[in-house]
Image: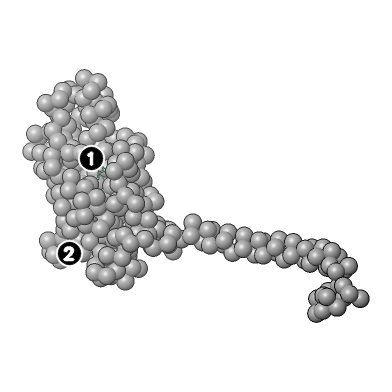
Amino acid sequence: METMSGNAGNPPESSAPYDKKKGGGMTMYALVAIMLVVGLVVGYFIGASLAQPAQTNDDLDDILDRGQLLVASDTTWAPFEIYNATSQQYEGVDIEIAQRIADELGVDLVIKPLGWDAVLAAAQTGQADISISSITITPERAESVDFSDPYYSANQAILVKADSGIHTLSDLDGKKIGCQLDTTGAIWVSEHLVQTGNVSENDFIQYSDIPSAVASLDVGTVDAVICDTPVAIAYAKDTHFDFRVAFTIYTYEDYGVMIAKGNTALKYEINRILAEMKDDGSLHAILVKWGCA
Ligand code: ARG
């Protein structure tokens, strides 16, 4: 009785251990349940943030604020990026891809025509938001910039005059070869023909752009020009010249959009748009339109 009165309003002491035990059991279940729920919620957010990176304060914000997407491109490379003097417009596969990216982001497209070396540096130096210019994804380049997922596969081709005696790789021995400086074609010739001694250093002429190399081929300063397959094929078809593609060198290159390093949100958007263009057939349609598929 004493105990009971002393414990007025509280459970009898005798039952306290039982109550505590019972209460302790319930707390455990509740705790486990809460931990499960918390785990699920945290897991969901981690998963969501992995799938869709939180928008960091990077170039994507600048693009959206500015209302313009600045795209660097060496627009001397038909049929991927070329200035059409008649329509006074930039056109080609890459220009249409750039337009779609701008459209999807809801901003205007501004093409920044730059020399090839500047195009390769533009995303990093901030001269443009991205570079789209038939840029081959290479491990060396990927050390200093980021690339989107691949959107086109190309190889190298040897362009010659229609009446040239060059038909196979060994026919290039001792010949004069032209290319665009700092392209994958230039690197290929340097590694496989110049460093091996098949072509002399002096006979390997690197031009700042491909039209200059092709003009030299036309007047006979060089015997062959190396460039990406779609470009060589377009020149071979061009009735202003009398060229043919002598042969293809299978380098299995992938073109990607160049983005400054660490621009996760922008890269995510570009990859999303490229994937959409692959899925909805519009990328294929663009390639067909420009004779590249
Ligand atoms: N795909 C080659 C490379 O990345 C050549 C690209 C040249 N592009 C251009 N617009 N000139 O090296």
Label placed on residue 183: 1
Q: Position of residue 170 (x, y in %)?
A: 26, 24
User: Can the viewer see residue 284 in this picture?
Assistant: no
Q: Position of residue 33 (x, y in %)?
A: 70, 64
Which class describes the residues within 10 Å of circle 2: few (<14), some (14-19), or many (20+)? few
Q: Which residue is at the far right?
A: 1
User: Residue 68 versus residue 277: which sits nearer the camera?
Assistant: 68
Q: Which residue is at the far top?
A: 197
User: Can the viewer see residue 179 in this picture?
Assistant: yes
Label 2 sits on what residue type? Gln
Determine if the C-beta at disc 1 is less than 8 A from ligand 1. Answer: yes
Q: Of label 1 and label 2, which has the lower sequence position?
A: 2
Name the residue: 36% across, 60% down. 56
User: Residue 143 versus residue 279: which sits nearer the camera?
Assistant: 143
Name the residue: 15% across, 25% down. 201
Asked where in the image residue 58 lies, by quadrant, the reply is bottom left
Q: Position of residue 199 (x, y in %)?
A: 19, 24
Residue 242 lies, with reference to residue 67, above or below; the image says: above
Q: How is the image coloured?
A: one colour
Tag 1, which secondary structure?
A: loop
Label placed on residue 89: 2
Q: Please give left or right for residue 25 compared with residue 242 in the image.
A: right
For ligand 1, give the image quadrant. Answer: top left
Residue 113 lies, with reference to residue 176, above or below; the image says: below
Q: CA distance from mark 1 to mark 2?
A: 25 Å
